[in-house]
Every structure is written in C-alpha cells, then in structure tokens.
Amino acid sequence: MKRKYFLSVFIISFCFAGCHQKNGSNENTDQIIELAELFCRAEALKNERFVLADQIRFLEDSTLIDTSNVELKSQMENLRTSANQIILKTKLLADSVLALQNHIYHGLEPEAKKRLDQEFLLQINKLCFLKKNSFQPDSLH
C-alpha cells in the first residue's frame, strides 16, 4: 500500500513539475521574443544614428564652405536636435534591454543560458533579418 501511495505521489509530482517547467519555458520564450524585439529596435536606432551622423558630417562640411548660409545652419540645428532625441531613445532602450536580460538570465544554469541564447538568436533572425553571428548574447551576461 505504501509503495503504491509513494509511486502515485511520485508520478503526480513528476507531472506537476513537468507542467511547471513548460510554463516557465513558455514564459522565458515570450521574454526572449520581447528581448529580440527590443534588440531589433536598437538595431534600427543604430542605423538611424549612422544616417544622421552622415547627414551632420555633410552639413558641417557644407557649412565650412559657406559660413553665411542661414538655411544650412538651421538644418544643422534640426539635425542636432534629432540626434539628441535619438541619443535619449537609445539610452532608454539600452536600459530596457539590460533590465529584461538581467531578469531573464538571473540565476540560470549555464545550459539554460545557452538554450535561451540559441532561442534569442533564432528570434532576432526572424524579427530583424540579421546574420546569426552579428550578435553574441553571452557578451551581455
């Protein structure tokens, strides 16, 4: 009788543990997708920064040539305002990425981290169309 009771408790516990683990896995997958979406936004902001930097350099060169052109100076001021806005967005996004990453990876075993890293790379490939080796999540742990 005790043996059957122990076996029943063991099987039920095993089922609950398996269900709990799957729910945790789904939660981690959802968080990894969210992290990948944040990363994709960060990549888009990085590209905006590069375009903006090129525009600023071009205008700076043009302004050096024609120092009396008020329109160029006005355009430069607008670009610098845009640059400041992008810098703020980038900082807020970086803070969000770091906080979510710390939440997801906190206290995980190395094997679980590797599994999540693989899932992260899969998600950014789906969402951002990036090459697989362009980002290494281990560098952020």
Image: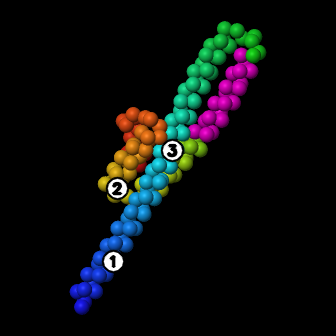
**Sooner in the amino-acid sequence: mark 1 or mark 3:** 1
Is 1 included in the stretch rendered in magenta?
no
Span of residues in magenta: 72-90
The answer to whether any part of residue 96 appears in the image is: yes
Based on the picture, tell me whether residue 85 belongs to the magenta stretch: yes
Query: Which of the two marks, 1 or 2, is nearer to us in this view?
Result: 1
The disc label shown at residue 138, or none? none
- Vertical relation: 130 (above or below) 77: below
Whichever of labels 1 and 2 marks the residue nearer the N terminus, that label is 1
Quadrant, the N terminus:
bottom left
99 or 124: which is nearer to us? 124
Side of 119 where 73 appears, left or right: right
The residue under label 2 is 112
Q: Classify 67 as above or below 89.
A: above
Residue 37 marker = 3
Amino acid beneath label 3: Glu
- Name the kind of residue labelled 1 in the image: Ile
The residue lying toward the viewer, choosing from 76 and 117, is 117
**Which structural element holds mark 2?**
helix
Q: Are marks 1 and 2 in contact (CB under 8 Å)?
A: no
Residue 5 occupies which quadrant of the picture? bottom left
Q: Residue at coordinates 53% horizontally, 30% vertically from top-left?
A: 47
Q: Residue at x 61, y 36 (%)?
A: 87
